[in-house]
Amino acid sequence: MTGAEPLAGAVFNPPGALRIELSLAPEWGRIEFIRVAVGQALAAVLHPHDDRIDALSMVSAELLENALKYGARDQRAVGFTVERTGDPIAITVENAVDAASPHPDALRVRLAWIARFPSPAQAYLAALRDLYGDERPRGSGGLGMVRIAYEGGCALHCETPAVDRILVRATLAGPAAPRSSGPVPEDPGDAGERLRRVD
Ligand SMILES: Nc1ncnc2c1ncn2[C@@H]1O[C@H](COP(=O)(O)OP(=O)(O)OP(=O)(O)O)[C@@H](O)[C@H]1O
Ligand SMILES: [Mg+2]
Protein backbone atom coordinates (compact mmCIF):
# COMPACT_ATOMS: atom_id res chain seq x y z
CA MET A 1 0.00 0.00 0.00
CA THR A 2 1.33 3.47 -0.86
CA GLY A 3 0.89 6.40 1.52
CA ALA A 4 -1.67 7.99 -0.85
CA GLU A 5 -4.30 5.22 -0.49
CA PRO A 6 -7.12 5.83 2.02
CA LEU A 7 -7.64 3.29 4.82
CA ALA A 8 -10.42 0.86 3.93
CA GLY A 9 -12.11 1.45 7.30
CA ALA A 10 -12.39 5.17 6.69
CA VAL A 11 -14.13 4.53 3.36
CA PHE A 12 -16.60 1.82 4.40
CA ASN A 13 -17.46 2.58 8.03
CA PRO A 14 -19.92 5.28 9.10
CA PRO A 15 -18.58 8.06 11.35
CA GLY A 16 -18.52 6.88 14.96
CA ALA A 17 -17.70 3.28 14.07
CA LEU A 18 -15.16 1.74 16.39
CA ARG A 19 -13.19 -1.47 16.64
CA ILE A 20 -10.55 -2.23 19.25
CA GLU A 21 -9.06 -5.70 19.24
CA LEU A 22 -6.40 -6.71 21.73
CA SER A 23 -4.68 -9.88 22.78
CA LEU A 24 -3.64 -9.33 26.37
CA ALA A 25 -1.12 -11.04 28.57
CA PRO A 26 -3.16 -12.16 31.62
CA GLU A 27 -1.72 -9.65 34.09
CA TRP A 28 -3.85 -7.69 36.54
CA GLY A 29 -1.97 -4.44 35.98
CA ARG A 30 -3.20 -4.27 32.37
CA ILE A 31 -6.89 -4.01 33.26
CA GLU A 32 -6.74 -0.38 34.40
CA PHE A 33 -5.05 0.64 31.13
CA ILE A 34 -7.83 -1.04 29.16
CA ARG A 35 -10.53 0.55 31.30
CA VAL A 36 -9.11 4.02 30.62
CA ALA A 37 -8.38 3.29 26.92
CA VAL A 38 -11.97 2.13 26.31
CA GLY A 39 -13.25 5.34 27.94
CA GLN A 40 -10.97 7.50 25.78
CA ALA A 41 -11.90 5.69 22.56
CA LEU A 42 -15.64 5.93 23.30
CA ALA A 43 -15.33 9.63 24.21
CA ALA A 44 -13.70 10.18 20.82
CA VAL A 45 -16.56 8.60 18.85
CA LEU A 46 -19.56 9.42 21.11
CA HIS A 47 -19.78 12.61 23.17
CA PRO A 48 -17.39 13.25 26.08
CA HIS A 49 -20.35 13.40 28.51
CA ASP A 50 -22.12 10.29 27.22
CA ASP A 51 -23.19 7.97 30.07
CA ARG A 52 -22.13 4.96 28.01
CA ILE A 53 -18.46 5.85 28.50
CA ASP A 54 -18.33 5.11 32.24
CA ALA A 55 -20.75 2.19 31.88
CA LEU A 56 -18.66 0.40 29.26
CA SER A 57 -15.36 1.18 30.99
CA MET A 58 -16.74 -0.61 34.06
CA VAL A 59 -18.03 -3.49 31.93
CA SER A 60 -14.58 -3.91 30.33
CA ALA A 61 -12.91 -4.14 33.74
CA GLU A 62 -15.48 -6.60 35.16
CA LEU A 63 -15.19 -8.94 32.16
CA LEU A 64 -11.40 -8.84 32.18
CA GLU A 65 -11.20 -9.44 35.94
CA ASN A 66 -13.31 -12.57 35.44
CA ALA A 67 -11.16 -13.75 32.53
CA LEU A 68 -8.08 -13.55 34.75
CA LYS A 69 -9.74 -14.91 37.91
CA TYR A 70 -11.51 -17.90 36.34
CA GLY A 71 -9.40 -18.46 33.22
CA ALA A 72 -6.96 -21.35 32.80
CA ARG A 73 -3.92 -21.09 35.05
CA ASP A 74 -1.54 -21.34 32.10
CA GLN A 75 -3.48 -19.22 29.59
CA ARG A 76 -1.16 -17.18 27.41
CA ALA A 77 -3.55 -14.48 26.26
CA VAL A 78 -7.03 -13.08 26.79
CA GLY A 79 -8.93 -11.73 23.77
CA PHE A 80 -10.64 -8.37 24.18
CA THR A 81 -12.77 -6.59 21.59
CA VAL A 82 -14.91 -3.46 21.57
CA GLU A 83 -17.03 -3.00 18.48
CA ARG A 84 -19.53 -0.43 17.32
CA THR A 85 -20.84 -0.42 13.79
CA GLY A 86 -24.31 1.02 14.40
CA ASP A 87 -26.00 2.00 17.67
CA PRO A 88 -25.19 -1.08 19.78
CA ILE A 89 -21.74 -1.32 21.33
CA ALA A 90 -20.42 -4.81 22.09
CA ILE A 91 -17.58 -5.77 24.43
CA THR A 92 -16.30 -9.32 24.08
CA VAL A 93 -13.76 -11.16 26.22
CA GLU A 94 -12.50 -14.65 25.43
CA ASN A 95 -10.35 -16.75 27.75
CA ALA A 96 -9.11 -20.29 28.14
CA VAL A 97 -10.51 -22.46 30.95
CA ASP A 98 -8.96 -25.44 32.71
CA ALA A 99 -10.28 -28.89 31.82
CA ALA A 100 -13.19 -29.77 34.14
CA SER A 101 -13.37 -26.20 35.44
CA PRO A 102 -16.74 -25.56 37.14
CA HIS A 103 -16.70 -21.91 36.06
CA PRO A 104 -18.26 -22.05 32.57
CA ASP A 105 -21.30 -23.82 34.06
CA ALA A 106 -21.39 -21.38 36.96
CA LEU A 107 -21.43 -18.54 34.46
CA ARG A 108 -24.29 -20.05 32.44
CA VAL A 109 -26.26 -20.61 35.65
CA ARG A 110 -25.64 -17.00 36.67
CA LEU A 111 -26.80 -15.58 33.34
CA ALA A 112 -29.93 -17.75 33.40
CA TRP A 113 -30.59 -16.58 36.98
CA ILE A 114 -30.37 -12.92 35.90
CA ALA A 115 -32.68 -13.56 32.92
CA ARG A 116 -35.40 -14.93 35.23
CA PHE A 117 -36.03 -11.46 36.72
CA PRO A 118 -38.43 -9.06 35.03
CA SER A 119 -35.69 -6.39 35.01
CA PRO A 120 -31.93 -6.13 35.63
CA ALA A 121 -32.70 -3.80 38.56
CA GLN A 122 -34.62 -6.57 40.32
CA ALA A 123 -31.81 -9.06 39.66
CA TYR A 124 -29.31 -6.59 41.11
CA LEU A 125 -31.39 -6.08 44.28
CA ALA A 126 -31.79 -9.83 44.72
CA ALA A 127 -28.02 -10.33 44.27
CA LEU A 128 -27.32 -7.68 46.93
CA ARG A 129 -29.77 -9.36 49.29
CA ASP A 130 -28.09 -12.74 48.69
CA LEU A 131 -24.66 -11.30 49.26
CA TYR A 132 -25.27 -9.14 52.31
CA GLY A 133 -28.06 -11.23 53.77
CA ASP A 134 -25.61 -14.15 53.90
CA GLU A 135 -28.07 -16.29 51.94
CA ARG A 136 -25.85 -16.68 48.90
CA PRO A 137 -26.38 -20.13 47.41
CA ARG A 138 -23.10 -21.96 46.81
CA GLY A 139 -21.63 -21.26 43.41
CA SER A 140 -24.09 -18.51 42.58
CA GLY A 141 -21.39 -15.95 41.81
CA GLY A 142 -20.96 -12.42 43.06
CA LEU A 143 -21.98 -9.07 41.65
CA GLY A 144 -20.01 -8.72 38.41
CA MET A 145 -22.59 -9.99 35.93
CA VAL A 146 -25.55 -8.29 37.61
CA ARG A 147 -23.60 -5.00 37.67
CA ILE A 148 -22.99 -5.37 33.92
CA ALA A 149 -26.71 -6.01 33.35
CA TYR A 150 -28.01 -3.28 35.67
CA GLU A 151 -25.40 -0.51 36.00
CA GLY A 152 -23.93 -1.23 32.56
CA GLY A 153 -27.35 -1.64 30.90
CA CYS A 154 -25.98 -4.52 28.83
CA ALA A 155 -27.44 -7.75 27.51
CA LEU A 156 -25.16 -10.69 28.35
CA HIS A 157 -24.29 -13.71 26.26
CA CYS A 158 -21.78 -16.52 26.71
CA GLU A 159 -20.66 -19.36 24.49
CA THR A 160 -17.91 -21.94 24.27
CA PRO A 161 -16.07 -21.53 20.96
CA ALA A 162 -13.95 -24.59 21.90
CA VAL A 163 -14.07 -27.09 24.79
CA ASP A 164 -11.34 -25.20 26.61
CA ARG A 165 -12.47 -21.64 25.86
CA ILE A 166 -15.25 -19.33 26.94
CA LEU A 167 -16.47 -16.16 25.29
CA VAL A 168 -18.54 -13.56 27.15
CA ARG A 169 -20.18 -10.65 25.32
CA ALA A 170 -21.91 -7.62 26.84
CA THR A 171 -23.94 -5.56 24.38
CA LEU A 172 -25.27 -2.11 25.12
CA ALA A 173 -28.12 -1.39 22.75
CA GLY A 174 -30.10 1.68 22.04
CA PRO A 175 -29.75 5.32 21.34
CA ALA A 176 -27.59 7.83 23.12
CA ALA A 177 -28.61 8.95 26.62
CA PRO A 178 -30.01 12.51 26.87
CA ARG A 179 -26.78 13.71 28.55
CA SER A 180 -24.90 13.00 25.37
CA SER A 181 -26.83 15.42 23.16
CA GLY A 182 -25.42 18.77 22.09
CA PRO A 183 -22.27 19.69 20.23
CA VAL A 184 -18.93 18.17 21.12
CA PRO A 185 -16.75 20.81 22.84
CA GLU A 186 -13.50 21.64 21.06
CA ASP A 187 -11.68 21.19 24.34
CA PRO A 188 -13.18 18.29 26.33
CA GLY A 189 -12.51 20.26 29.58
CA ASP A 190 -13.92 18.50 32.64
CA ALA A 191 -14.77 15.37 30.71
CA GLY A 192 -11.22 15.15 29.41
CA GLU A 193 -9.92 15.61 32.94
CA ARG A 194 -12.22 12.86 34.18
CA LEU A 195 -10.89 10.49 31.52
CA ARG A 196 -7.26 11.40 32.16
CA ARG A 197 -7.62 10.81 35.90
CA VAL A 198 -6.64 7.29 36.90
CA ASP A 199 -7.71 6.77 40.49
N1 LIG B 1 -14.56 -15.37 31.93
C1 LIG B 1 -15.00 -16.37 32.71
N2 LIG B 1 -14.48 -17.63 32.57
C2 LIG B 1 -14.94 -18.64 33.34
N3 LIG B 1 -15.88 -18.49 34.30
C3 LIG B 1 -16.41 -17.27 34.49
C4 LIG B 1 -16.01 -16.16 33.71
N4 LIG B 1 -16.71 -15.09 34.11
C5 LIG B 1 -17.50 -15.50 35.10
N5 LIG B 1 -17.34 -16.83 35.37
C6 LIG B 1 -18.09 -17.61 36.38
O1 LIG B 1 -19.32 -16.94 36.61
C7 LIG B 1 -19.46 -16.58 37.99
C8 LIG B 1 -20.19 -15.27 38.11
O2 LIG B 1 -19.34 -14.17 37.73
P1 LIG B 1 -19.57 -12.73 38.40
O3 LIG B 1 -18.59 -11.79 37.78
O4 LIG B 1 -21.01 -12.39 38.31
O5 LIG B 1 -19.27 -12.98 39.95
P2 LIG B 1 -17.87 -13.15 40.71
O6 LIG B 1 -16.73 -12.91 39.76
O7 LIG B 1 -17.95 -14.49 41.39
O8 LIG B 1 -17.90 -12.03 41.82
P3 LIG B 1 -17.49 -10.47 41.66
O9 LIG B 1 -17.59 -10.13 40.20
O10 LIG B 1 -18.49 -9.74 42.50
O11 LIG B 1 -16.08 -10.39 42.17
C9 LIG B 1 -18.04 -16.58 38.54
O12 LIG B 1 -18.04 -16.83 39.94
C10 LIG B 1 -17.38 -17.70 37.74
O13 LIG B 1 -17.65 -18.95 38.32
MG1 LIG C 1 -16.65 -11.12 38.60
Image (tube, grey):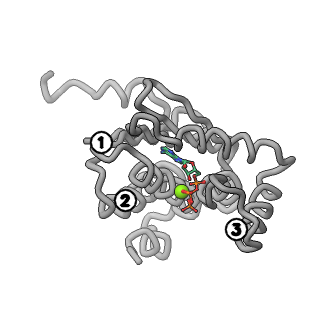
Q: Sort mark 2 into few (<14), some (14-19) or many (20+) by Cα contacts within 10 Å.
A: some
Q: Which quarter of the figure is the N terminus placed in? A: top left
| Residue at the far right in the pictured view | 118
Residue 57 location (% of width, % of height) = 49, 58
Amino acid type of the residue tagged 2 in the rendering: Ile
Who comes first in sequence, dot 1 or dot 2?
2
Residue beneath label 1, please? 75
Residue 26 at x, y percent in the picture: 30, 51
The residue lying toward the viewer, choosing from 23 and 105, is 105
Viewer-closest of 125 and 61: 125
- Residue 131 badge: 3
Which amino acid is tagged 1? Gln
Give the residue displayed 78% in from the left and 68% down from the top: 129
Q: Are marks 1 and 2 in contact (CB under 8 Å)?
A: no
Using the image, determine if residue 112 lies above or below residue 186.
Answer: above
Q: What separation in Å lies between label 1 and label 3 (alpha carbons)? A: 30 Å
